Image (tube, helix red, strand yellow):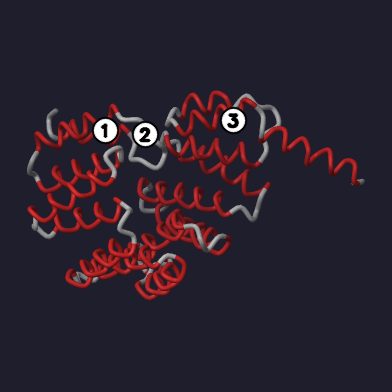
Amino acid sequence: MDRSCVWLLLFSAFLLAKSPDCERARELYQRTEYRESLGMLLPIAQKDAATFGLIGQNYFMIAEYKKATEALEKAIRMEPNNAGFFHWLGRTYGRRAELGGPFTAPSYALRAGQMFEKAVALDPSNKGSAGDLLDFYLDAPGFLGGGMHKAEELAAHIARTDPAEGHYALAQIEEKRKEYNSAEQHLRRAWELAPSQAGRAMDLAMFLAKRGRFDESEATFDQAARMAPDNAKILFERANTYIHEQRNLEAAKQLLQRYIRAPLTPDDPPRERAASLLKKIGA
């Protein structure tokens, strides 16, 4: 292929990535309007890797995991060094493992771990990939690639670039071991290292509630809410905590109703989860 043809293909891919339909689809995705985003993307005749990637993310968000897998695998074939595609494919296989039967779930779980590992190898600085890989190491049995030793090594890797996140990772490991005092110390240290991050306070509040220390949990949730009054995820997690502990159910109802009305992003729990929790408490 001569250089002019190569240049033309690259330029065409650039135009596609910047096309109005793709930009509009990305805006819709960010507003959690996933089906509308798909409606813009699917008719595109010549899809590039970014388009297939966004199609896969949209399908993931509406729980069509087989279609998400197919789209993300196409994206990876076109861009085999894109860490983000591997991360999303790992998340997709993870959900398929959760929902799969005894014959399919193990293979899906194994694939999820492999995809997360590939994502972290390609982009070691990505906290989302590292966090999902840590969860996999803590939850998956050894024969599927999980293990506490791997989790410890990953936590050390995370700490080198983000000390606060490293302490959060260590807190998860210690909680898994039921070393609750040590887990609490790591959560508090994470907050000390990142005092402006409301999520650090929220993590501690959720942990304290699980330990039955409700007054301390409430005070810490209040601090998180004051730090980030527009953070919808705090509303959801506080309500979810109340429901899990079977207390303050009227407050949980009000928090979830506020959450459903709030502007959400793909990083927030879906509104459907909030609606399911409301149904659970008879609201």
Going from the N terminus, do you reach mark 3 or mark 2 first?
3
Q: For the residue marked with disc 1, what is the amino acid? A: Tyr
Q: Position of residue 178 (x, y in %)?
A: 19, 69
Q: For the residue marked with disc 3, what is the amino acid? A: Glu
Q: Residue at x 57, y 54 (%)?
A: 83
Secondary structure of the residue carrying numbered label 2? loop
Q: For the residue marked with disc 2, what is the amino acid? A: Leu
Q: Position of residue 275 (x, y in %)?
A: 25, 31
* Tag 2–tag 1 contact (CB < 8 Å): yes
Going from the N terminus, do you reach mark 2 or mark 1 first?
1
Q: Which of the 4 quarters of the picture holds residue 279? A: top left
* 94 relative to 5 in the view: left or right: left
Secondary structure of the residue carrying numbered label 1? helix
Going from the N terminus, do you reach mark 1 or mark 3 first?
3
Q: Which of the 4 quarters of the picture holds residue 99? A: top left
Residue under numbered circle 2: 264
* 195 relative to 27 in the view: left or right: left
Q: Residue at x 12, y 60 (%)?
A: 211
Q: Residue at x 34, y 60 (%)?
A: 194
* Residue 23's disc number: 3
Residue under numbered circle 1: 259
Seen in the picture, residue 213 relative to 161 is either above or below; the reply is above
* Residue 122's disc number: none
* 163 relative to 116 in the view: left or right: left
Question: Which quadrant is the C terminus positioned in?
Answer: top left
Mark 2 burial class by Cα count in 10 Å: few <14, some 14-19, many 20+: some
